[in-house]
Image: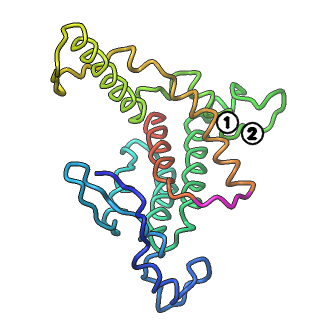
Amino acid sequence: MLVAERSGQEGSITMEQQFDPDRLRPAEFVSEPDPRSLMFARVDLTNGTSRQINLADHHEGISMCTLHAAVPDDVVIQFETARNLYLYSWYVYRFYPVAEQQSLACLELALRQRLHEEIKTGKITVGKTKRKPTLHPLLQYAIANGIVKNEGFSTWRNRGEINSRHRVEMEKIREATERNLDNITWDDSDIQIKAEDLDWDYVKILGDILPLFRNRHAHGTTDLLNGAVLTIRTVSEIINQLY
């Protein structure tokens, strides 16, 4: 299933007339979804049918972002706050960036607790200063010391499968050309992920981009994107590697 934006905005006009979703919600409309939440559809790529997404779809997306039992409770509580903010963005669309910001604050908390001894002994520093290390140096240290690895991320593994499929497709096309075949078939059993398919450094990208996301929120932004679940999922995968 794929979530895609709808071309129409049916269903939102009436509610926009009833309340302004960017202002304090009137009490009688507290349980109404934000009109912008109804502007998306779930498309079934197998038969081309589509339907408007609903709260259950929204809940399903964030419910898959979980922490395992070894993560300390105080970190879990902060992460659950991010998940609930995302969940309630169904009703208040502007909770999306707040949920992302909370998840990144939780990540820094988790790193700071996991690397407490390294911070205490001065192994993690901010340049030549004695300031307490923040998200960027903490995350860079965890990556450099193999605490956070590519293998711990679903995105890294998924990219490997995508690259593998592309490689097999190219190989089959080349085979068909060399054998002068009109068509050639293959199935999923031919998709075998090789080292070459996984040859990209995802953690290096994350080490640079997540602190930028955090700083963007911390210093104020007018961005309004609904992709916070991707950041929250990434944060959960980092924290699960820390503990």
Alpha-carbon span between mark 1 and mark 2: 11 Å
Residue 44 position, x and y percent, is: 25, 54
- Check disc 2 and report its element: helix, strand or loop: loop
Pointer 1: what residue?
136
Q: Is residue 134 left or right of residue 61?
A: right
- Check disc 1 and report its element: helix, strand or loop: helix
Start and end of the magenta stretch?
A: 220-224
**Which amino acid type is shown beneath numbered disc 2?**
Lys
Residue 228 position, x and y percent, is: 51, 54
Q: Residue at x 47, y 75 (%)?
A: 35
Q: Residue at x 67, y 36 (%)?
A: 136
Q: Is residue 62 left or right of residue 85?
A: left
**Magenta stretch mostly in which secondary structure?**
loop
Residue 4 position, x and y percent, is: 39, 56
Residue 184 position, x and y percent, is: 16, 21
Farthest-out residue, top: 178
Q: Nearer the viewer, residue 36 or 184?
A: 184
Q: Residue at x 53, y 29 (%)?
A: 203
